Amino acid sequence: MRPPDDDARLLSLLHSAKRELNGLRLVHLHLSLLKDKNANDISAIRRTVQEISENSAFLQMFNLSNDDMIILYKGIKFSSITDICQSIERLMLSRTKMTGLNPYREDSLYSIMELSLNFVNVMRFIESLDTTGGPDGVKARTKPAITLEELAKIERQMPVFDLSPFMLNQPVMDIRPTAQNQREYFELYIAVKNVEDRLSPDFDITANRWLFNYFTSNLDNSILKTLNYGIDFIRGHKIGLNLNLTTVMSSAFVKFDERLTDELRRKVVLEINKADLVENETLYKEVVEFARSRGYSICIDGLNPFWVTHMDLEYMDCDYAKLFWSPGMLDMPRDEYDSLETRINNQAKCRFIMARCGSVAGLMFAHRVGIHLVQGRIIDNIIRKGVSVSDAVTVARVMDDD
């Protein structure tokens, strides 16, 4: 039996430990890269690690949803950890082989890191496990990472590949009673997982950050090219475009921009992923300056409670910020919940969106912390049933109070 995954539990622990990272180290065992997986692997690893756990100040193991394992520890000699990791690697590779480099671009089954120096990268990796390209991604990361050769093959197919069946939209709704089912805007996006299943079913396009960025840049250009042939629909709707920073500053976007009137530009929200922003903050400021001069709105996408409470959104000069819903947020410590609620309610300009909201619990959490804009499957289902979103929130509140 495959053990249940600990993604949410590990994220919650890391959030709570972010102020006490000194001395906390991490081992990332990349078991998802093993060509042949064995149900006994985890048991064997646990027995091996148990040999040194009794002498540690702290040691805890977590099973990730992509079959990897994370070991957090403190107070163990580096040489002892290295010996254990090498022993595990020899054990695993004695019967199978790895399918490629690990996410940190190492040819190794394990990575040992000082958590305080790698906190953002580790958090980003764990968060990415439920990202498949749409607002309500489903966890899936068992296939080998895409290679340069495979990406080149996909790129050759793109010019003749019809993306229109994979271009979806999802509304961002205002849940306040006074809004009367008002749609703030529609996010247009490509269902990357569906494109992967069609063009590269044997590889995981999202597993390699650098190649995925290159691939999404091509998708961005395809979306812009499609919009160039039909911008009239923007007149009736405000839309959100999830684009890379480099795309916004590209010639393809310039061509798109030139076709829009001032009125239409004010109906476009440029959604920038948090990871892209962190890696290219200087370019982000250029994009903001460009957007302000042309009339576009800016949304920072992909935030969690940690980023909301630590990112200076006023300095980032954004109009919207998307907080991704996670059931683990229900178990937040009181001080972290209070910090999140305070930050949300003290933003003078930025409006928060609770995204990937697939449950009533997420809808209620958004209402409690003061988030009025919600996006996700729960909203889609309410609209599909012809019910007012604000009425649904009222009914859910009454049931929650009971």
Image (cartoon, grey):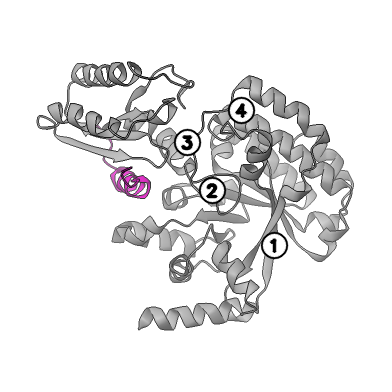
Q: Could you classify mark 1 by the number of other residues whose Cα lies within 10 Å: few (under 14), some (14-19), or many (20 or more)?
A: some
Dot 4 lies on which element?
helix
Query: Of label 4 and label 1, which has the lower sequence position?
Result: 1
The answer to whether mark 4 and mark 2 are in CB contact below 8 A is: no
Query: Whole-Å distance between the Cαs marked 4 and 1?
Result: 30 Å
- Per the rendering, the mark at residue 211 is 4
Q: Is residue 310 left or right of residue 165?
A: left
Residues shaded magenta:
1-23
Q: Which residue sits at x=61%, y=33%?
A: 282
Q: Nearer the viewer, residue 236 or 261?
A: 236
Residue 10 in magenta stretch:
yes
**Closer to the observer: label 3 or label 4?**
3
Name the residue that disc number 3 marks.
142
- Per the rendering, the mark at residue 71 is none
Dot 3 lies on which element?
loop
Query: Whole-Å distance between the Cαs marked 1 and 2?
Result: 17 Å
